[in-house]
Amino acid sequence: MPLRTPLLFVVAVAFSLTCVVPTDKSGDLRVELSPLPTLLVKDSVRLAAVLMDAAGDTVPAVITYSSSDATVLNVDSTGLLRAVGTGTATLTIRAVAFESAAPAVQVLRVRGKLEVDSVRPMSVRFGDSLEIFGVGLEPDSLFSITLGGVIAQISGFFPADSTQPEREGMLRVWVPPPAPRRATLALLGFAGGLFVPDSFDVAQRDLYEFNDTVPWALGPLPNGIFNPALALEPRFREDGVATIQRDPTDWYTFTNTAAGDRTIVFFSSGAGAQAFGVFLTDSLWWSSPLRDFRVGSSAWTVGLQTYLCGGRSITSNGEPVRIEEVLFPLSIIAIRGLPAGTYHILAPYVPFGQPSPYELLIANSYLSVLPPDAAEENDYCDVATPILGAPPSPLTIDNPHDIDWFTFTVGPPSLFSARVTASHPDADLDLYLVRDFRPDSLPLIRASSLSGQVDSLSALLPGGNYFLIVVDFPGQSTQYALTTTVNAAGAALRSEPAGAAAAERDADLARLKAKRVAAAAARPALSPAVRALVERARR
């Protein structure tokens, strides 16, 4: 009897240490593990596991933890799990002294802070979208994304788990020109750099080719369109089985099913301002015999240095006159209440040896740096604002290189004077006075040549119809005031020396051209306001 008391004491101690019933009574016991989150390197989580019977009741037990690969998952005796490396490991949780109880077994993948599972498609064109699936792809966590060494813009991020958007999801990026034919994808972010081992087949043309001499019909665009990764391709390129020469343009049409606001933004940091000239028109076709574009007999155009009225150019001595402006690699054409119909956008070719990238936005709204004035819409001759009497005040050049058309009629021969005063200190508005002989001709009478905030012109005019055009020379949006006077001249007009008006006109044009050449050498960068508008368009 004295020998049995110590033995009972030892058994009692063993029971208190294991905290389990002394025998494994049932094979229906199982270890349950609470769900685990997605794991990234350096994550840690406290495991919660219990032993449960068939009825779902908890059975007291000591739980042990093990990992098949400690270089991926490390777990200690308390259930603290640490993700120490990328890869896959099996986590096994058992109950001590319950050998027949089903353990909890879970295969876990530890992912890097930045990791790509897959990318599609493998064959793309400029302006296409690549869909990148993986973790760490949230735009705020990335510094850059390149395809073939060319920066790719993000078009959208779609998290798979809204509670952990940085963990996994799909990042969509534009395929940028001039990415090479075989291109690799690289991402750089806070979590490091990543090179996707696959290479992508990049066709050396954009989504809308071939749209050189046949327009790409975009349709009514009820939600507008934006693509920042289109390309002006080289003059020579593969087409079928032979290398042929195609005409160097990109040509689009869109449709207004009803009158409404439209804004076209065409931006190219690589095109080069001197080769830049995009215009919008209501009538355009390609003439195969002439190998050139033609506008309709009553067409108007709006575009940098490209302005037609009734299918006619402004002329001097029978030769077309170029409206002088400081060139930017940017065109913003905002039209308020554009009538129903189909319209054409023509973009120039840039003679580089590789595709030159550009961005195109067509919005079904009016985007502008400054609020438009009460005279809008008067960007083309068909909607010119009557100027005599009380013109709206203040008037506005609401976008870079906005142009305002005004119309007036002179009865008896008169002396016409106009004066424009801009409010912005860097503005320089010019004036063009044009005789309206439509449909035959639009001869230039006078063009201003003054630099600075104030400009003016005057001319002796015979009776007839006229246009006064206010042109934004430097691309500086501004408000301005315009005053005009018409005084009967009579004999003064008849006494003007023969050829004097033509000589003054030629001198005006020479001064304007010289001003543009001088300004081109010191062409300003896009203003912060214009950059903000471009960024707003991109969103």
Image (cartoon, helix red, strand yellow):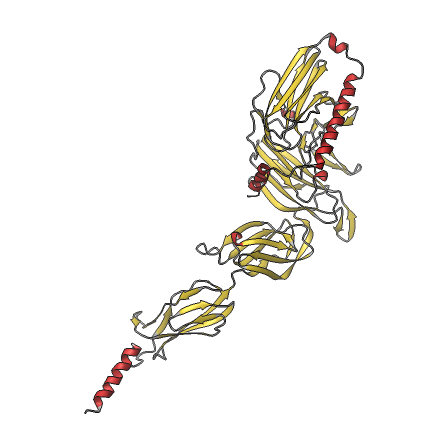
- Look at the image and tell me whether residue 535 can be seen: yes
The residue shown at (57%, 43%) is 538
Tell me which corner region of the image, top left, top right, bottom left or bottom right, holds residue 465: top right
Q: Position of residue 61 (x, y in %)?
A: 32, 75
Occupied quadrant, residue 49 = bottom left
Is residue 230 toward the left or the right of residue 441 in the image?
A: left
Q: Can residue 314 be seen at all in this image of the molecule?
A: no
Rendered residue at 78%/52% (across/down): 242
Between residues 121 and 38, which one lies in front from this camera angle? Answer: 38
Q: Nearer the viewer, residue 471 or 252?
A: 471
Considering depth in this image, is 453 or 149 the residue closer to the camera? 453
Quadrant of the rendered structure where residue 431 is?
Answer: top right
Q: Position of residue 292 (x, y in %)?
A: 77, 37
Q: Quadrant of the C terminus?
A: top right
Residue placed at 76% from the left, 18% from the top? 501
Residue furthest left in the image: 1
> Up-down: is 132 above or below 264?
below
